[in-house]
């Protein structure tokens, strides 16, 4: 008999409100949680996607007020490659394991059709690693270094025109996998009125192409107001600099030009403060949560469905993991058998092919042999004939020789007895011989 599901039990449960007689202490739960989290530390992973030299490293240094390792990319990368770098940062007693992933060589190839792929593959690989850890029998998620990307800062070139198709394609491919925050880089290179129009253009292009960017959450009352105001400022137009310039009697981070100073943290100069506020100070936890509950969940669901797992069977009954495993195992074994049979058949066919080839060769050899044999016999017959002819000639010759010798001896005898008669006889005998 199937056990009642969790939902069924809850349905019959009656909840009653009781008051406590005095202080029990579970009101310290949030503090316990905070203390546990602080001990454990946090991880936060940022992916920077943008053209080479757009100001990614400078912005990261400006955001975290430190100097990360930087390595200038050349414009001659054959393909986009992802370069992760992890740092341990500490502020007060909070430890942050920060990973900054650079999409090196982005936008540098002549053919940019596949530029998004290494980025997508990298994000998927981090999800896959996490899923593999989750599926292990002995999991160690507690101290697992979570490398899933929590936010993608997409650096838009400040052209003042519109988004490039590379930007739209890449963001479209990424939007179901990661929280995208689009930012206009090097915003000091674009005038105030142009920037305003550029922002509107970018947002309308993103909407018309169905690109979902990260929206700062407005469901938590504490941050709803600021987040909804900030959502209206997207994409943030930022300026990065680690250079300190004296403005009045204060040292501020700024970019200095012959015609003036752009202060990074001055909100009337750029949106850097807004970005830092939203990314680090207000919504870092939401970005981590969204990554886990939305993007990773989607990856996990698709992956498990691909593997044949389902929540319910065709009769809407809960799907048993054991049954799924058995079905998959059978499918796998069936496929293995099929493959084995195919290979066996292939081997048999190959043997048959080779056998018939060999037979054909043997037949050809046999024919050749017969042909040679016939030629040989013919030649042998001719030689025999020639030999017979020669023998006959020899016999005839010998006969003639014998006759000549006989004649000679007879004539010799006659000459010695009757020289005159001899001549006569000789003539006679020659005539008869011929
Ligand atoms: P790669 O890692 O090589 O792809 O470059 P990057 O995107 O990390 O750019 P990086 O931060 O190295 O900056 C490249 C150049 O742009 C440097 O000369 C920076 O000083 C300059 N730069 C960075 N941020 C800004 C900015 O906001 N405005 C202007 N005008 N220049 C900037
Ligand atoms: Mg860089």
Image (cartoon, rainbow, N blue to C red):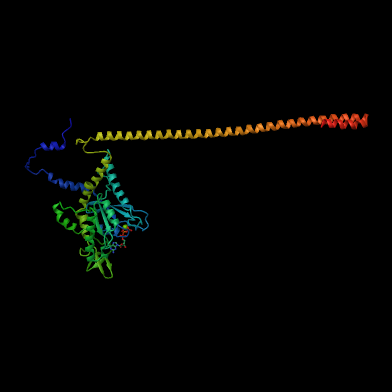
* Relative depth, front residue between 1 and 82: 1
* Relative depth, front residue between 224 and 25: 224
Camera sees residue 98: no
Q: Give the vertical position of 428 relative to 285 (above or below).
A: above
Q: Give the vertical position of 152 relative to 301 (above or below).
A: below
The residue at the far bottom in this view is 259
Spot occupied by residue 210 in the image (x, y as percentages of width and height): 23, 53
- Ligand 1 image-quadrant field: bottom left
Camera sees residue 191: yes
Spot occupied by residue 144 in the image (x, y as percentages of width and height): 27, 45
Labels in figure, total:
0
Q: Which image quarter is the N terminus in?
A: top left
Q: Give the vertical position of 145 relative to 55 (above or below).
A: above
Spot occupied by residue 423 in the image (x, y as percentages of width and height): 90, 32
Task: Describe residue 206's horizontal placement relative to residue 75 as left or right.
Answer: left
* Relative depth, front residue between 402 and 35: 402
For residue 131, which quarter of the picture? top left
Spot occupied by residue 200 in the image (x, y as percentages of width and height): 21, 60
Q: Which image quarter is the C terminus in?
A: top right
Q: Give the residue at x 35% y 35%.
A: 336
For residue 337, which quarter of the picture? top left
Q: Give the residue at x 19% y 57%.
A: 231
Task: Describe residue 288's horizontal placement relative to residue 345 as left or right.
Answer: left
């Amino acid at each position: 008999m199937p056990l009642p599901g969790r939902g069924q039990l809850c349905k019959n449960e009656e909840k009653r409100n009781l008051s406590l007689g005095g202080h029990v202490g579970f009101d310290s739960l949030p503090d316990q949680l905070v203390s546990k989290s602080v001990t454990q530390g946090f991880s936060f992973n940022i992916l920077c996607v943008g053209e080479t030299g757009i100001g990614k490293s400078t912005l990261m240094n400006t955001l975290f007020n430190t100097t990360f390792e930087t390595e200038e990319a050349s414009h001659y990368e054959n393909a986009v490659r992802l370069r992760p770098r992890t740092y341990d940062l500490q502020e007060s007693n909070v430890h942050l394991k920060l990973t900054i992933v650079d999409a090196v060589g982005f936008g540098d190839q002549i053919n940019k059709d596949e530029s998004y792929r290494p980025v997508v593959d990298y994000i998927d690989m981090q999800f896959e690693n996490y899923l593999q850890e989750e599926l292990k029998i002995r999991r160690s998620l507690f101290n697992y270094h979570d490398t899933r990307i929590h936010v993608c800062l997409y650096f838009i070139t400040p052209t003042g025109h519109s988004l490039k198709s590379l930007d739209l394609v890449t963001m479209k491919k990424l939007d179901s996998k990661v929280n995208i925050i689009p930012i206009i880089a090097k915003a000091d290179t674009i005038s105030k009125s142009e920037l305003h129009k550029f922002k509107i253009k970018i947002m309308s292009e993103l909407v018309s192409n169905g690109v979902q960017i990260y929206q700062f959450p407005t469901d938590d009352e504490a941050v709803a107001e600021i987040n909804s105001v900030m959502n209206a400022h997207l994409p943030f137009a930022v300026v990065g600099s680690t250079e300190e310039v004296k403005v009045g009697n204060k040292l501020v981070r700024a970019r200095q030009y012959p015609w003036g100073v752009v202060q990074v943290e001055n909100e009337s100069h750029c949106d850097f403060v807004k970005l830092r506020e939203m990314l680090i100070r207000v919504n870092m936890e939401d970005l981590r949560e969204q990554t886990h509950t939305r993007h990773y969940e989607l990856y996990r669901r698709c992956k498990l469905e691909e593997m044949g797992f389902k929540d319910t069977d065709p009769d809407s009954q809960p799907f048993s993991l054991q049954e799924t495993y058995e079905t998959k195992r059978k499918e796998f074994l069936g496929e293995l058998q099929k493959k084995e049979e195919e290979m066996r058949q292939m081997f048999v066919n190959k043997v048959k092919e080779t056998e018939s080839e060999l037979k054909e060769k043997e037949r050809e050899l046999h024919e050749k042999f017969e042909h040679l044999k016939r030629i040989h016999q013919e030649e042998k017959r001719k030689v025999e004939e020639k030999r017979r002819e020669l023998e006959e000639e020899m016999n005839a010759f010998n006969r003639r020789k014998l006759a000549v010798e006989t004649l000679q001896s007879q004539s010799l005898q006659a000459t010695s007895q009757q020289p005159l008669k001899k001549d006569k006889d000789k003539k006679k005998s020659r005539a008869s011989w011929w």
